[in-house]
């Protein structure tokens, strides 16, 4: 029968477990053998007990759990060809030729490199005597399917990454908690949310929380923004609001690529307006807690489709990314999605924000 392996890699996110459960069960339903790889690429390179065959009931009761029950890791070894050769050996020895990776753009880039090198790696293993010609023939092709798990919503090829919606829920809960204390004391709050390169969480939570001001990496404010912000804040106080909320993405920068930190924003407000101002950095709280209904449902949908895609794939099939586009689950060429995502990063680094936003439009707010 066909053998499928699944791993989660990069930063954990809610919805990874829902996807994992759907993948395992849909693949078993189609009579495949399914292996779980623990600790991401580290487990793939290490083999042994890190790669275990799984059953239908092994993935019970995991749907709503945050994070990933099979663990994730950053793995230096997999970045080197030697590491990837060990990984290939671990798959061939188990007859696995189908791999589903749930992770961010780095993890999916790694998966694609692995597939491109696959036949070369098998030649090397054969020459070294680690595998025989029959094993090489049986496993001559590796099929890859990618799913995007990331709270940042920073990947082309899907409108929503697994975990972004749950992270928004955490941010909203935090804002609700802050609002009562902030209003009681008539304070200003600077809330820092995750997003080193992508302002999705900051922008969308600002919309949902009626924030007064928002700073994101994709749209550096023009010089003199501090004055405009303070003007906005004092207007809203005059209109009767008892607090102010400013949401800052951790990667926010100004027109000169200088980071805009929460500390800087606080300093400006205190100096210009004299407001009692506090900073809250949400950090890993955003990755924690229960998975939202939306992340559970999209996890199920993309997970099931990924299982079908990887089982259907043959020696001629290119790797695909299974994502959500216009509320439909679709398969896109994995490499194109990775390339586009990298092009967005390059455009941002070069200060070409308009282009970066246009390229990411699919996954951004309009
Ligand atoms: P996140 O969005 O949470 O950062 P990510 O998948 O982009 O997730 P990375 O740390 O970039 O996270 O990658 C995770 C792992 O994937 C790395 O530790 C490494 O093992 C593998 N990987 C990433 N890039 C490559 C690459 N170019 N070649 C081989 N392996 C890679």
Image (cartoon, helix red, strand yellow):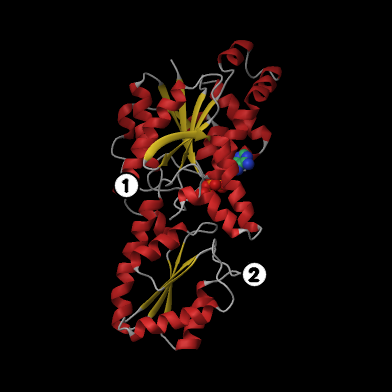
Q: Residues within 10 Å of mark 2 (few under 14, many from 20)?
A: few
- Contact check, label 1 and label 2, Cβ < 8 Å: no
Which numbered disc, 1 or 2, marks the residue closer to the eye? Answer: 2
How far across and down, in percent of the image, does residue 103 sit? 49, 42
**Disc marking residue 255:** none
Q: Camera-side residue: 99 or 41?
A: 99
Q: Quadrant of ligand 1?
A: top right
Report which residue position mark 1 lands on. 294
Asked which quadrant contains residue 221, the reply is: bottom right
Q: Residues within 10 Å of mark 1 (few under 14, many from 20)?
A: some
Residue at screen point 35% across, 69% down: 210
Confirm whether residue 18 shows in the render. no
Q: 244 left or right of 38? A: left
Confirm whether residue 175 shows in the render. yes
Q: Camera-side residue: 127 or 327?
A: 327
Q: 319 left or right of 241? A: right
How far across and down, in percent of the image, does residue 283 sit? 45, 62
Q: Camera-side residue: 164 or 335?
A: 335
* Rendered position, 67 above or below 214: above
Q: 262 left or right of 130? A: left
Residue at screen point 40% across, 26% down: 308
How far across and down, in percent of the image, does residue 324 sit? 41, 41
Q: Camera-side residue: 160 or 77?
A: 160
Report which residue position mark 2 lands on. 256
- Secondary structure of the residue carrying numbered label 2: loop
Residue at screen point 67% across, 17% down: 126
Q: Between disc 1 and disc 2, whose residue precedes?
A: 2
How far across and down, in percent of the image, does residue 248 sit? 47, 68
Q: Between marks 1 and 2, how big is the CA–CA gap?
A: 38 Å
Residue at screen point 39% across, 62% down: 205
């Amino acid at each position: 029968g066909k053998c499928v392996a699944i791993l989660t890699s990069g930063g954990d996110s809610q919805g990874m477990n829902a996807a994992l459960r759907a993948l395992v069960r849909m693949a078993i339903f189609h009579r495949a053998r399914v292996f779980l790889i623990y600790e991401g690429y580290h487990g793939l390179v290490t083999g042994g007990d890190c790669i275990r065959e799984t059953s239908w009931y092994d993935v019970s009761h995991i749907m709503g759990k945050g994070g990933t029950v099979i663990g994730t890791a950053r793995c230096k070894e997999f970045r080197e060809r030697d590491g990837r050769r060990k990984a290939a050996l671990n798959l061939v020895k188990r007859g696995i030729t189908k791999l589903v990776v749930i992770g961010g753009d780095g993890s999916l880039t790694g998966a694609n490199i692995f597939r491109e090198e696959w036949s070369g790696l098998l030649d090397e293993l054969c020459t070294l005597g680690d595998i025989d010609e029959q094993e090489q023939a049986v496993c001559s092709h590796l099929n890859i399917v990618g799913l995007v798990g990331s709270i940042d919503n920073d990947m082309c090829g899907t409108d929503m990454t697994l975990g972004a919606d749950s992270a928004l829920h955490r941010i909203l809960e935090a804002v609700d908690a802050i609002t009562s204390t902030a209003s009681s004391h008539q304070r200003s709050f600077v809330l820092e949310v995750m997003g080193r390169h992508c302002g999705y969480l900051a922008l969308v939570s600002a919309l949902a929380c009626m924030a007064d001001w928002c700073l994101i990496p994709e749209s550096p404010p023009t010089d003199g923004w501090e004055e405009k912000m303070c003007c906005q804040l004092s207007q809203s106080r005059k209109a009767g609001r008892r607090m102010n909320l400013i949401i800052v993405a951790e990667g926010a920068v100004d027109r000169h690529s200088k980071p805009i930190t929460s500390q800087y924003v606080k300093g400006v407000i205190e100096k210009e307006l004299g407001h009692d101002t506090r900073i809250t950095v949400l950090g890993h709280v955003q990755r924690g807690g229960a998975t939202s209904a939306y992340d559970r449902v999209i996890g199920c949908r993309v997970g099931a489709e990924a299982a079908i895609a990887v089982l259907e794939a043959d020696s001629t099939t290119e790797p695909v990314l299974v994502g959500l586009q216009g509320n439909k689950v679709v398969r896109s060429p994995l490499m194109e999605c990775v390339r586009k995502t990298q092009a967005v990063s390059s455009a941002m680094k070069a200060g070409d924000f308009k282009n970066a936003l246009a390229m990411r439009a699919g996954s951004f707010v309009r």
